[in-house]
Image: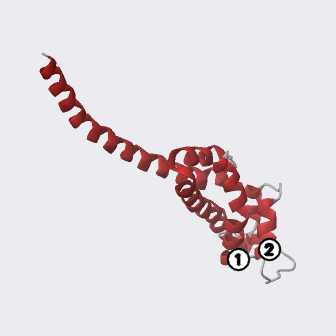
Amino acid sequence: MDQVSTASFEAFWFEVIPILNWETEVQQARVSIHNISSVAIFPTVFIPSTDSMWVAGMSFGYALGILLIMCGVTIGASLPYFIDSLFYNKIQVKERRMISFELYVTLLRISPFPYTVYNYCAVATGVKYVPYLFGTLLGKVPEVFVAIYT
């Protein structure tokens, strides 16, 4: 009787463990897609995305969590920029300066100024997309580190 229960126990775990491992991998893929999309879409509609950053840190660890969040931040900063660029011709700005705004974008990202508002206002300042994106990524790194570390 003892041999039967031991054999069935081993057979049970021999079958169940691969299924559990597979399901864990599938759920992590879903969680990563959810995190990237929520970090990308929430700021576009003025919803904070820090909770999604916490989930990414808990689910994927420090290095992979930062990578996933930065992908979402890139998409989330690009969406308002491109939405606003559709209306760029309707924005009347008296003086458009074509200087590099990387430093200004970076400083605005680490300041308490609401970055979701700036995402929509960036086109009106005349900043080009590449300096805007570079400054955004550089300025968001401290917030992402703090969100994942907590």
In the rendered image, which quarter contains the N terminus? top left
Mark 2, other Cα within 10 Å: few <14 / some 14–19 / many ≥20: some
Residue 124 at x, y percent in the picture: 77, 71
The answer to whether residue 70 is visible is: yes
In-image side of 110 versus 53 (left or right): right
Vertical side of 2 occupied by 91: above or below: below
Between 86 and 13, the residue placed more toward the observer is: 13
Q: Amino acid at mark 1?
A: Pro
- Describe the element under mark 1 as helix, strand or loop: helix
User: What kind of colouring is applied to the model shown?
Assistant: secondary structure
17 in relation to 118, above or below: above
Q: Residue at x 80, y 64 (%)?
A: 108
| Relative to 49, residue 109 above or below | below
Task: Please identify the residue farthest to the right as the structure is shown.
Answer: 94
| Mark 1 or 2, closer to the camera | 2
Name the residue: 68% across, 46% down.
47
Q: Mark 2 belongs to which amino acid?
A: Leu
Badge number at residue 131: 1
Measured from the top left, where is residue 52 in percent x and y? 60, 46
- In the rendered image, the residue lying farthest to the front is 2
- Measured in 3D between alpha carbons, the distance from the residue under mark 1 to the one under mark 2, in whole angstroms, is 9 Å
Residue at the bottom extreme of this rendering: 98
Q: Quadrant of residue 113?
A: bottom right
Image quadrant containing the C terminus: top right
Q: In front here: 77 or 13? A: 13
Measuring from the top left, give residue 73's x and y in whole percent: 62, 60
Residue 91 visible in this rendered orientation of the protein: no
Mark seen at residue 113: none
- Under tag 2, what secondary structure? helix
Residues at circles 1 and 2 in contact by the CB criterion of under 8 Å: no
Q: Which residue position holds label 2? A: 103
